[in-house]
Image (cartoon, coloured by chain):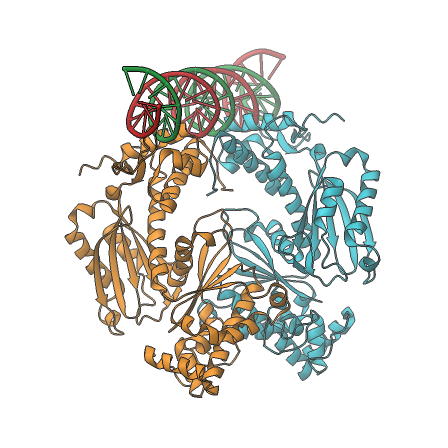
Chain colours: A cyan, B orange, C red, D green
Amino acid sequence: MARGVADTEMIRRQNRDLILGALRRAGPLSRSQIAADTGLSNATLTAIASEFVSQGVLVDLESTAGESRVRGRPSVKLAHNRKAAFTLLVELDVTRCRISLLDYAGILVDRIESAITPATFAETSAPHFLAERIQLIYARNANAADRLLIVAISVQGILSSEETGMKWSPIAHLAGVDIVTPLQDQFGLSVKLYKRGRLMADGMRWLEPELAGKTIATVFIGSTVGMGLTFADTDRIGSDIGTEFGHMIHVPDGALCRCGAVGCIEAYAADYGILRSAYSVPRHTPPAQAVPPDDFRQIVSRARMGDRNALHAFNLAGSAIGYGLNRLMSIFNLDQIVILGPGTAAYDLMQPGITEGATASLMGELRGLPPVTLVAEASEPIYRGLTMKALTDLDRTVFAAMNQPAIAQVAE
Amino acid sequence: MARGVADTEMIRRQNRDLILGALRRAGPLSRSQIAADTGLSNATLTAIASEFVSQGVLVDLESTAGESRVRGRPSVKLAHNRKAAFTLLVELDVTRCRISLLDYAGILVDRIESAITPATFAETSAPHFLAERIQLIYARNANAADRLLIVAISVQGILSSEETGMKWSPIAHLAGVDIVTPLQDQFGLSVKLYKRGRLMADGMRWLEPELAGKTIATVFIGSTVGMGLTFADTDRIGSDIGTEFGHMIHVPDGALCRCGAVGCIEAYAADYGILRSAYSVPRHTPPAQAVPPDDFRQIVSRARMGDRNALHAFNLAGSAIGYGLNRLMSIFNLDQIVILGPGTAAYDLMQPGITEGATASLMGELRGLPPVTLVAEASEPIYRGLTMKALTDLDRTVFAAMNQPAIAQVAE
DNA sequence: GAGTATTATTTCAATACTCGAAAAAATAAT
DNA sequence: ATTATTTTTTCGAGTATTGAAATAATACTC
């Protein structure tokens, strides 16, 4: 239940939100379909839909000829008005920065891609680097400029407590700078940072709707180990978080991690950790900067051929992840686990270790390891998560609330 | 934001809930005070309050003479109508079972206390044991019988996933039986189980209102180790959970715990674990059934006198808790830690270990150990938590929703 | 090709709520 | 007795949702 005073205005806002949400989930729908979907009456749908259309938030879709084969008055589908607003998605990675301009229907309009090196943010501060590129987007898309409202940024690492910058990041020289405020001030936009792990988790829920209503841990295994959680709690959308699972301490005084601490799960289960174990390199040896995919594949095939050291390395990795999941499960119930990323190629090798670790406690034994789904490609859920965060943020904060025909009447 | 269709009825329900909540938080208040508190208008307060009074949910309090010294129309305080409903609180412990009958204002009306031994639930099944006593309460309080609506039960251990019974409990022979359903069927009541750790956490928030709006871990250290969490998320009341923190694995293959698993935090930080370490008893030795308080005090004083073994034991305990908190902090931010129970008497001895463990990871180093508050007596927050769960459950599910003068017109 | 069946959408009257402003009530101060 | 002051109630306006009835827009049938 929401807090705060409830009045007639809130009813409208909430029902508007309900309608926008139904369209996000299912794509264009007719008024009757939305009514059935949401539980609202047809009368209300007429009222709210006409309001939306006159405000330029939604548009009636031309019925594609030769599609309706049923008798009766043909239904008219409602869809997001692409020109109602625009959003910028920024994917900040260790190796690249990709900025995408999307319209209100989520369709890509423009894109800038730049390489990132460890030197990049030493030479140009991150907010300045981004501002330059945003400027360029503005220049190239004058028509979108006045309706560009929000920026959603995907980052890796630990957010500052105000969520305006990073406390730590694997992206060099990114930490310690306020990224959000300068951009907000310069462009007058709403700017938000999202942890990559959180986006993975949320993105999976959009990609696999049957995961809704479950508490899910989404674990990325690759050059790092990351995790996002989405909670069963359907009360609130956005009930998802990013965690520092990869840097949860697996064993006190354990192997050296890229983050500088020792004993992190990542130090055992990320590619560099597995490589280190497989070659019996001392656990305190500083990790390799990057592991070429071929090197990783080689370890995998060695393990499959029965190589003891390689098998042991995957066992250690699985065990680190399994104990981590176990510790998570002593905090709350997990209904499902999704494993993402290159590590999925070696899941069978890690599985015994994972199961052993996950069931090592009383709790783990009683509940068992939750069902595991593998998804090799992580970039899709991340992009989807970022997209939907941005668009539903628009839906909720801008268009659900708008009850004057404010911005509305878009000419063009 | 709540899901679902919003209509005019929901407005009323939500605002009724707001008013009942304000009264729970602050005690009896006048209409104007509630209006100021909640943000509702005076007009609305008149409307809803008169509805409540005519339904017998609230009553106008007689103004205590010689109290108002201000000029103007004297205010009339509203209070919960004690006779509107009744609730049963059941505190199930390893050694005792206490059943309390409370009226709608939270005032104790009747109470039954029984000793529990390991044999108790072997001889009589738990639901039957409880039914007998509830029967007795009914017999002794005929006037409350038809308005006794809900039962809230405090338990220790792991709930079954449907939350109708226990999967495991330190209370002998309690696990594996459905406790909720038989009682619900027999008496036609709404029965709910609550983990003790969750109640501690929620109770603390009622006892120390300044803790509201923070994410808090409430850790019990005594004959067991338990933890509840309350989340900053003020969106929903009831955003609190009980955890199995005590049985989170501290070290794979570690000390033997009472639960049968090895390496649990409890096996290092509960009184029996500390005793075992202090006397250098092998870590796989089955733990003592119960530790007499004097034995524990003796170890404490030895440690204070500089005894190496005793100091080491507290250091191990602190470290187990510290690493546990660290792992928790890699999942979400903690703003505050509250430590409860007998273990607080030795907090100074455990503190170095706790700090060391809590700051061992990158995340822990960056954020540091959150502020710690000590509360020696744990029974008060537990009882308060149980009380408020029961009463706010009544507020929300029964009285906020009631829009017909249904049950209402209570004669006497 | 006109009439009919069928489905989608809109219109309409009823009902429920909140709110601000004005009125009424109840007390202390003068 | 009158006035000032504070709380509570009353009243009219404004905004929502809803079910039922009306209207609109097709396909089907003969």
Position of residue A330 measured from the top left corner of the image (x, y, whole percent): 48, 66
Label count reads: 0
Q: Residue placed at 42% from the left, 79% from the top?
A: B273
Position of residue B389 measured from the top left corner of the image (x, y, whole percent): 36, 52
B363 vs A254: above or below:
above
Position of residue A207 measured from the top left corner of the image (x, y, whole percent): 62, 51
Quadrant of residue A268 in the image?
Answer: bottom right
Residue A73 relative to residue B318: left or right: right
Residue B179 relative to residue B329: left or right: left
A263 vs B24: above or below:
below
Can you see residue A123?
Answer: yes
Quadrant (top left/top right/bottom left/bottom right) for the C terminus of chain A: top right
B280 vs A230: above or below:
below
Front residue of A240/B32: it is B32
Q: Residue placed at 47% from the left, 42% from the top?
A: A3
Can you see residue A220?
Answer: no
Position of residue B128 measured from the top left corner of the image (x, y, whole percent): 23, 62
Residue A240 relative to residue B104: left or right: right
Front residue of C2/A81: it is A81
Quadrant of residue A169 in the image?
Answer: bottom right
